[in-house]
Image (cartoon, rainbow, N blue to C red):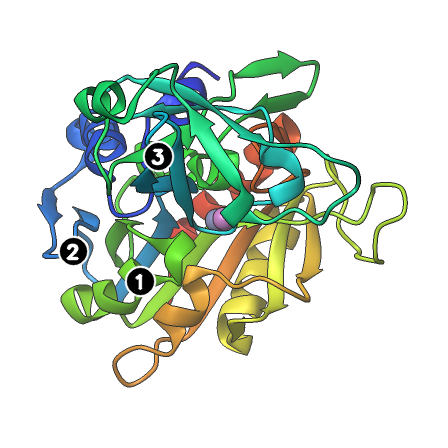
Amino acid sequence: MKLLKILTQAAGPSGNEERIRDVIINEVKPYADEITIDPLGNLIVRKKGPGKKLMLDAHMDEIGIIVTYIEEDGLLRFSNLGGLMLNTVISQRVRFLSGVSGSVYKEMNGESELKLSEMYIDIGAESREEAEKLVSVGDVAVFEGAFDEKGNRIVSKALDNRAGCYVLIEALKKVKEPKNDLYFVFSVSEELGLRGAKTAPFNVRPDYAVAVDVTRTGDLPGKTKMAVKLGEGACIKVKDSSVLCHPYMKAKMVEAAEKRSIPYQMEVLESGGTDTGAIQHAIGGVPSGCISLPTRYIHTPSEMVDKRDLDAAVALMSAIIEDGCE
Ligand code: CO
Ligand code: ZN
């Protein structure tokens, strides 16, 4: 789990993926035939094969914050990069790319509804002048969330979607003589609306695609019904709000899992989209599927996944690559 720890702890808020991209490049270099970075920053790692083009995608950005205004007293006003869960951000630590750290607060007076506009970040500065020496409007930060292993469970920030990046990297390492021409794409700005995945297919021109991302679970008290549980295997996506996965890819994935007894669960995510939707609806249409990782507490600094699901996801991705798409 050393690689996953490194991946989760690297900073890469949407639009600022340079650091996490460098970490991934370093890891995939020995296994790649070609590495390119496209105009928007998507990392495209090719493993040559004779058949049609198969694109495998995981977004590498994470949620974060962006400074909008610096108060006279040195406190920072901010906006969200991606879907912040407001009830989980108060008193959390954030770290800017420069290394400056701060904490998110809001004046708590009773049970008022949480609004981002009432929150601020305290970096310890005593005046605007002092704060401006440390940060500028437009600077970005990510939440801090250390990597912990507890039995089969892993807790960390940014498991959305470094867990997906991990699956792609591990699958790439296992590739031998692929049937398809493989393009492993680590995309940018998914959390801002699948932005990298909207453009990457025009550079790759894939015939088929499989994305990997996290999904919710239905195994917590008081939650809406969802037939996904932590530890029960990789998910084969049927639907989310961005896509109805292509029947060809869905069938391929089920067959690959069945053939090798890889534990899997069928997933219908009622709210939330993935790169899968952007890719399937790009160019003239790219039949796409998605492997999802059951994840608790998504978009908090303490997301949780299960090692057995990660192993199953790597096995399933490797199986799809081995079987090939014709
Ligand atoms: Co996300
Ligand atoms: Zn994600």
Q: Earlier in the sequence, mark 3 or mark 2?
A: 2
Left/right of residue 91 with respect to residue 165 in the rendered view: right
Return the residue nearer the eye: 161 or 301.
301
Front in this rendered view, residue 265 or 159: 159
State the residue position of label 3. 71
CB under 8 Å between callouts 2 and 1? yes
* Residue that carries the numbered disc 2 in the rendered image: 40
Residue in the image at 23% along x and 31% along y: 28
Q: Nearer the viewer, mark 1 or mark 3?
A: 3
**What's the residue type where badge 2 is placed?**
Leu
Q: Quadrant of the C terminus?
A: bottom left
Look at mark 1 in the image and give the residue it sits on: 195
Amino acid type for the residue under numbered disc 1: Arg
Task: From the top left corner, tell me how far across and down residue 69 is, in percent.
Answer: 31, 42
Q: Quote the CA–CA distance across marks 1 and 3.
A: 32 Å
For marks 3 and 2, give the one nearer the viewer. Answer: 3
Residue 63: name its quadrant: top left
Q: Position of residue 285 (x, y in %)?
A: 34, 82
